[in-house]
Image (spheres, coloured by chain):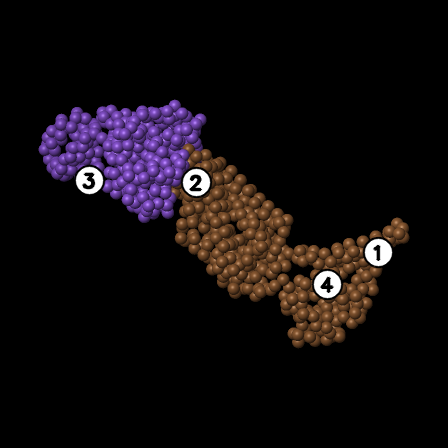
Amino acid sequence: MLQVIELKKSFGGKPVVKGVSFSVDKGEAFGLLGPNGAGKSTTISMICGLLKIDGGDVRVNGLSIKKDPMAVKRKIGIVPQDIALYPTMTAKENLVFWGKMYGLKGREAKAKADRVLADVGLSDRANDKIETFSGGMKRRINIGAALMHDPELLIMDEPTVGIDPQSRNHILETVKRLNEQGMTVIYTSHYMEEVEFLCERIAIIDHGEVIALGTKTELCNRLAGGTVIQLKVDPIKERFIQRLKTMEAVANVKIVEEDRIEVFATRADAALSQIVALSLEHRVQLLSLNVKEPNLEALFLQLTGRSLRD
Amino acid sequence: MKCLTIAWKDFMIRFKDRRGFMLMILMPLILTFILGSALGGVMGEDATVFPKTNLGIVWKDDDPLARQFIRDVLQSRDLKPYIHIKMADSREALEEHIREGSIDAAIVFPNGWSRDLNNGKLKGLTILADPGKSLQSDILQTLSQTFMDRAETTAVSTKTVLSVAVDSGPEQMAGLSQEVADELKQAAQQQWHAVEEKSVGQKPVSGMQYYAAAMAAMFLLFNMMNGAKSFIHERETQTLARLFSTPTEKISILIGKFLGTLYFAVAQFLIFMLATRFLFGVNWGDNALQTLSVGAAFAIAVSGLSMFIASVIHTEKTADVVGGIGVQILALLGGSMVPLTLFPDMLRQIAHIAPNTWALTSLVDIMGGTAWSALALPIGVLAGIGAAAVTIGTWRLQAR
């Protein structure tokens, strides 16, 4: 369905996207995960034909965005990061307008707008102006506008930024349903849990490069010390930390606060018993102990030394 | 045609905007009413084709040419209702009457005025007028000069033709001379109509009329900034980026933005025209097509300029500042506040750099009555400004 081939982009001589490559199969939900400024939106803008490509190519069903941009654009529905709607127009007027921009005719566009409004759960607000909507409702119409022409590929650029949990859940459920109905989805976010919920395969982007790509299981398996054991201790003793680091089942140890330690374990069960024994030996009181299963956040941390939300 | 969809969307957004409606429609109506009512006298309000005039005449020797001038011109069918003639014995008596206010202006015919006609050079008439009645004085000057020019031309021509005819043989002379004299006489009589047509705006333009045209010219200017701001706003809110992500050619989007401003400017002009016509009784002239043509050309100019401004200004805030100051300067320079006729000559020439000057003078000319040929230049200039600005603006925006 989509092939992104060695995509490159620079701004003012500074490379922002440095040869990003990945492919997405038809009907797949693909996640682009990375912190702010990683190059996700620039990559998306090039896929949509909004930004000129400096190097590489994007192909949708074999059509090159460079050679046949209009044909490619017809197949794509883009949900931008910002609310790209006209606030003084009603929800329905907005949808009809964007439908027409994708070639729908008057009556057809109106009928489709009614269906989309039902899909995003806002039929009862069809004739209200966008400026009267909450942030979450605006986001839903923002998505609806991208669905007007039944795109083969739906690209969503951080569609849940700054909204309430209820609207966020609604959006995630809507995207899940569309994907289950056969729509190919590319979902970019720096919210790991959203990408994990929606996407089968995930590319992690940082500093304009794909640093990891695969299914969630494949990625987590790459984690050395994938299980994180969070400890609250009293007191933190240097020798205790040093001994933890030398344990066979432990990959790394990190002091996160005055009394908090994160232990990255390769084998959680073995590490736990050793930690308890070591704390008794060093007379360190274990105030709390929490085990976190391997996740993409941990993988990103391991790969970059930074949090996804940094 | 996606450009039409974009244009209609822009038009409806602006049309439904209550604040915009207030600024673009109600405000010029209110200002027209205030300025037109307050400054009506300045514009010669309630004047007719010729202001009612008590005219004193000194005509001592029953000169035939003077008689003809009085009969065929001053007391012609067209002017008789407006000119009341009062005979006097001397220039001094006329001056006294003017001082008393019993007459507005006066003509003193020289003794034996027509004697010099055969030489082809008439003595000039003396025209006296109350200093406050310069309009009557100017018109009398024009009427007399025109009459004298024609009389001189007719006399000289007749003399020349007759001398030629004498050479052609006595048997043809009588018929030929009669024929030529008749034709020249006819030409001389037609001259009066030529004078009437020559004076641009012989129909006086009232203060309300002038300020209706002035406010139309001024408030249509706001479309330059509103159009540019609409473009910048779309860029800032990412709707422009979203438009570019649709399968729509860039040029189509840019033309759509231009047309959106054009639609609104034309609608604004039409609404304003109709509102002033029916609310204040403003007569926009006898030829509505002329008025609409000038309005359309001006709308093209401001819409084109909006695209140019959008290509050089990057933020709405800058557009607001530049627009506010720019419109005020253009409005002042273009005669929307103070009539252009009160400007010094040099400033009047400089004013032609403002598109609203061309629009305002044309609209006022149409109100007074003008020919299409006189409108060709302003319409051409306005359409040319619009075409050049939209071309440069679109080219610059497309290159981004």
Return the residue nearer the eye: A303 or B64: B64
Mark with earlier residue (2, 4):
2
The residue identified by callout 2 is B5
Q: Residue drawn at (63%, 67%), measured in percent from left and top?
A: B52
Instruction: Please give the letter of the chain rendered in brown.
Output: B
Check disc 1 and give the amino acid type: Lys
Residue A8 — which label?
A: none
Check disc 2 and give the amino acid type: Thr
- Residue B354 in sight: no
The residue identified by callout 1 is B159
Instruction: Please give the letter of the chain rendered in purple.
Output: A
Same chain? Circles 2 and 4: yes
Q: Position of residue A249 (x, y in %)?
A: 17, 26
Position of B122 compared to B361: left or right?
right
Dot 2 falls on which chain? Answer: B
Q: Look at discs 3 and 2 and give the one toward the viewer.
A: 2
The residue identified by callout 3 is A258
Q: Position of residue A288 (x, y in %)?
A: 13, 37
Same chain? Circles 3 and 4: no
Q: Residue drawn at (26%, 29%), measured in percent from left and top?
A: A180
**Residue B49 figure quarter:** bottom right
Q: Position of residue B149 (x, y in %)?
A: 76, 58
Mark with earlier residue (2, 1):
2
